[in-house]
Amino acid sequence: MRRRGPLSLPIFLLFTIGAVYPLIFTMNKIAVEAGTPPVAFTFWQTLGAAVLLLILAAWRRALPRLEARHLKAYFVLGLFGIAAPIALITWLAPKLPTGILSMVVILSPPITYLIALALRLERVRALSLIGVLCGVGGILLMAIPTFSLPEPGMVVWFLLALLAPASFALTNNLAALIDPPETPVLTFASGIVTAAAIMLAPVMIGLGETYVVPGPDTVADLAILGAAGVTITMYITFLIIVRAAGPVFFSQFNYVVVVAGLGWGILFFQESHSAYVWAAAVLMLAGVALLIYAARRRPATPAET
């Protein structure tokens, strides 16, 4: 999508969502540690966001369209962009430090590039390849359990957490392949989030994680409400930035996510990290920076126009 208009609003929104989004990991951890089943928390967080978005969409007369191509886009992006990765992150929240979970998400851009190569949506470029290698270097550095992760047993959970950015990366590529329809931001966001909530409902019931809101713990309910707010902010902001400045520009929000995620983890949970974790963060940031720089040097692709 080609840039349209000044960048002042996209830049402001970029830093805003980058600082706000890591709070979802904090809220996940608070709710799950308070006894809320992980998948149930993900469902209620998504359903809450969907209900609020649908109310806004109805008020603006911009409810999701129900044609086949629209429904396909809603459910495919809802599955790989929300339901699957957020459920995984929620389940892993009590098992990994918040800051490390935040850093894992930043790997979505390099994984996006690798999937694009496999699908022949992108070709090999030197800067992009170096960026991917930097990201892999960060993964390896963090996966040395005796030096980086607080406990050796966490390495398994860390490697499993890599499925989340892989899912986000798959979403990016599928979005280009299925050609999502041009719809108003509020319409598209409400459709994606609603589809994700619909898919999460049978998963929650099937796993026996039925949970009714309001629940027995007020703090958990507030965490669910807060996570719903973050979800709404994320998807509306994402669509606004992409339409105003393009997807490559939006990917820079990962810079802020890493720094803010480490900060929230230290602030709320008194987490501390070794020099290896900080070095890994620098490697990951360098990798994403190189990927973004390489993308800016090339002409816009059909997926970006």
Image (spheres, rainbow, N blue to C red):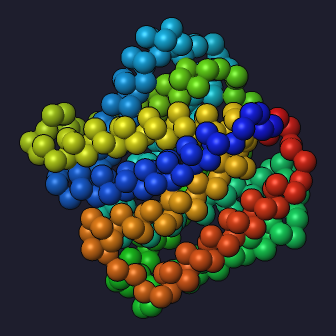
- Residue 21 placed where, x, y %? 45, 51
Visible residue check, residue 61: yes
> In the rendered image of this protein, does residue 269 appear above or below residue 64?
below
Taking the spot 38% from the left edge, 51% from the top edge, the residue there is 24
**Residue situated furthest left in the rendering:** 216
> In the rendered image of this protein, does residue 280 appear above or below residue 39?
below
Taking the spot 82% from the left edge, 61% from the top edge, the residue there is 294
- Residue 245 placed where, x, y %? 72, 41
Visible residue check, residue 160: no
Quadrant location of residue 71?
top right
- Residue 198 placed where, x, y %? 42, 28
Quadrant position of the N terminus in the picture:
top right
Whether residue 42 sits left or right of residue 156 in the image: it is left
Which one is nearer the viewer's eye here, 305 or 97?
A: 305
Whether residue 265 sits left or right of residue 213 in the image: it is right
Number of marks: 0
Quadrant location of residue 154?
bottom left
**Residue situated furthest bottom in the rendering:** 146
Whether residue 133 sits left or right of residue 84 in the image: it is right
> In the rendered image of this protein, does residue 33 appear above or below residue 286?
above
Quadrant position of the C terminus in the picture:
top right
Taking the spot 9% from the left edge, 42% from the top edge, the residue there is 216
- Residue 161 placed where, x, y %? 47, 63
Which one is nearer the viewer's eye here, 50 or 272?
A: 272
Taking the spot 33% from the left edge, 71% from the top edge, the residue there is 266
